[in-house]
Amino acid sequence: MSTRQFQALRRHTFKLASAGLLCAAITPALASDYPTRSVSLIASAAPGGTTDIAARMIAEPLGKALGQTVVVDNKPGASGNIAAQFVLRSQPDGYNLLLQYSGFQVITPHVQTNVEFDPVTDFEPVANVLSAPQVIVIRPGLPINSLQELVEYAKANPGKLNYASSGNGSLQHVATELLNQMAEIKTVHIPYKGTGPALTDLLGGSVDMTITTPPPLLPHIQAGKLRALAVTGAQRIDSLPDVPTVAEAGFPDLLIASWFAMYAPKDTPRPVVDKLAGEIEQIMKTDAFRQQAAKLGADAEFMGPDTLRKYTQAELDRWGQVVRSANITAE
């Protein structure tokens, strides 16, 4: 190498090192200033479902904590792909965040072939917001009062019952197909762009049943507009004390829970992610948030960035095995 080449290499190396030092200096500054404008929280489902409820539960107190408005923007459709792609195409600066439903994040990739994101490597995990068991509900017009009666009715009327879900590959879809296999029955799947639209048709009598989280269901169950048959948790929930668990109803292997978590685009600066996670952790510790979650039949147990990343991978692996063993595919 000539002297001139060596000196040019030194200058290039110095520039790279200087740029690295500059980035290292800027990143904490970004976190300390962040946010300087409103933040968009992209919910992957339509209004009315638990994804939307979770987004709005965290948006208001998070906005107060950050000193800027956090606006919930619902982008339903394509089993979470529309919202996920929108966030992934955004600048990794913390101003566009994803509130994602676990079914879309860790089940859809195993069921659909057109998923255009990696649920682990394409996002920076921020924090979970809520988790909840599922509730099996039917429209009251059916002559069914228990999970066992549902199975008996379905066997006597094969293919007559249908069920709503928030989309192909959603947890509602997979959970009901598991029930079909365990009980050796056949119910017809009708996918929607979120729990909200699915619930509207269930209340209107266009569909017969669904399996979803308690928050959007409770008011309708308590008003007698829906009939709850079982809870897919290990224990009964306080908001539905008379509804048995799936184990009590004869299906101990149908233990299923959903979770709703916040993600940022890949390469979002870690100090920004940590600032968001820290504020969310403090919000989730408050009595107001925890009591609101409990009233909805949900849990508010904090999970930070590193734990959420490992949990996302573990859930992706777990549901992959379930989908393959049950031979569940997109319709």
Image: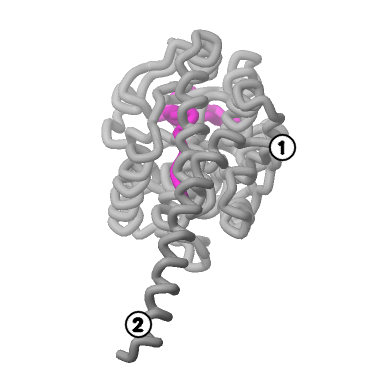
- The range drawn in magenta is 124-148
As measured in the structure, the alpha-carbon distance from the residue carrying label 1 to the one carrying label 2 is: 46 Å
Q: Is residue 142 left or right of residue 311?
A: right
Q: Is residue 187 visible?
A: no
Q: Nearer the viewer, residue 115 or 205?
A: 115
User: Label 1 crowding class (10 Å Cα cut-off): few <14, some 14-19, many 20+?
Assistant: few
**Amino acid under disc 1:** Arg
Position of residue 57 relative to residue 174, above or below, is above
Residue 37's label in the rendered image is 1
List x then y, in percent, for residue 285. 45, 15
**Which residue is found at the position 63% from the left and 34% from the top?**
52
Q: Nearer the viewer, residue 290 or 194?
A: 290
Which badge, 1 or 2, comes first in the chain's sequence? 2
The residue positioned farthest toward the front in the image shown: 3
Q: Nearer the viewer, residue 310 or 137?
A: 310
**Which residue is found at the position 37% from the left and 35% from the top?**
256
1 vs 2, front mark: 2
**Amino acid under disc 2:** Phe
Quick one: SS at disc 1?
loop
Q: Which residue is mark 2?
A: 6
List x then y, in percent, for residue 229. 46, 25
Location of the N terminus by quadrant is bottom left
Judge whether residue 269 is colored magenta. Answer: no
Quick one: SS at disc 2?
helix
List x then y, in percent, for residue 314. 29, 46
Judge whether residue 143 is colored magenta. Answer: yes
Q: Nearer the viewer, residue 197 or 93?
A: 93
- Count how many numbered circles sit on residues in the image: 2
